[in-house]
Image (tube, grey):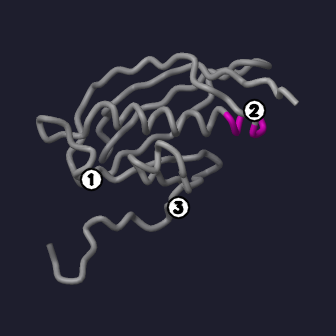
Amino acid sequence: MGEGRDETAFPAGWTAFDDPGFVALTGPVHHRLVEGRKQFAFKAEQKHVNLVGLVHGGMLVTFADRSLSIVAMEAMDGASCVTLEMNVHFVGAAKIGDLVETVPEIVRKTSSLVFVRSILTSGGRPLVTVSGIWKVLKDRS
């Protein structure tokens, strides 16, 4: 490590989400908009490690759920949505210090459901493929 260099600093151009709930314990999760598409990232830290020294699969799923949920809610004009189902396939591994990124895409939406998919990557390497269904909550007022 070089003198005065912050190894935990996040790359320029990203903004951290203010997540007061569960994600605050695992995050921060960052985001940016590139060519009209929302991108998400987190930097793997020691707190994300599993028993074999790699990023824990639970962290990758938490990150995917947070990222895809945001895109689902934005697709429904800010309506609250909850995860009904997520299909996750681990195809690679991330190490501490890696920048893990994803760019979710809406596959389909109806009046009450949003179908979303994405690939989590690090340095261009695929780590996780994920797809899911989000339910739009009805306003109970």
Residue 11, disc: none
> Mark 3 vs mark 1: which is more N-terminal?
3
Q: Is residue 58 left or right of residue 105?
A: left
Which region shows up in magenta? Answer: 73-78
Q: CA distance from mark 2 to mark 3?
A: 22 Å
Q: Is residue 68 left or right of residue 2?
A: right
* Extreme-bottom residue of the structure: 4
> Mark 2 vs mark 3: which is more N-terminal?
3
Residue 31 at x, y percent in the picture: 53, 53
Q: CA distance from mark 2 to mark 1?
A: 33 Å
- Residue 71 in which image quadrant: top right
> Mark 2 vs mark 1: which is more N-terminal?
1
Residue 117 at x, y percent in the picture: 52, 26
- Residue 48 in which image quadrant: top left
Queried whether the magenta region covers residue 77, the answer comes back as yes
Q: At label 2, which amino acid type do we have?
A: Met
Residue in front for this viewpoint, 72 or 124: 72
Q: At label 1, which amino acid type do we have?
A: Glu
- The residue singled out by tag 3 in the image is 15
Residue 45, disc: 1
Element class at badge 2: loop
* Extreme-right residue of the structure: 141
Queried whether the magenta region covers residue 95, the answer comes back as no
- The residue singled out by tag 2 in the image is 76
Vertical position of residue 108 compared to residue 52: above or below:
above
- Which residue is found at the position 54% from the left and 51% from the top? 20
> Where, quadrant-wise, is the C terminus in this rendering?
top right
Check contact, mark 2 vs mark 3: CB within 8 A. Answer: no
Residue 6 at x, y percent in the picture: 28, 73
The mark lying in front, picked from 2 and 1, is 1
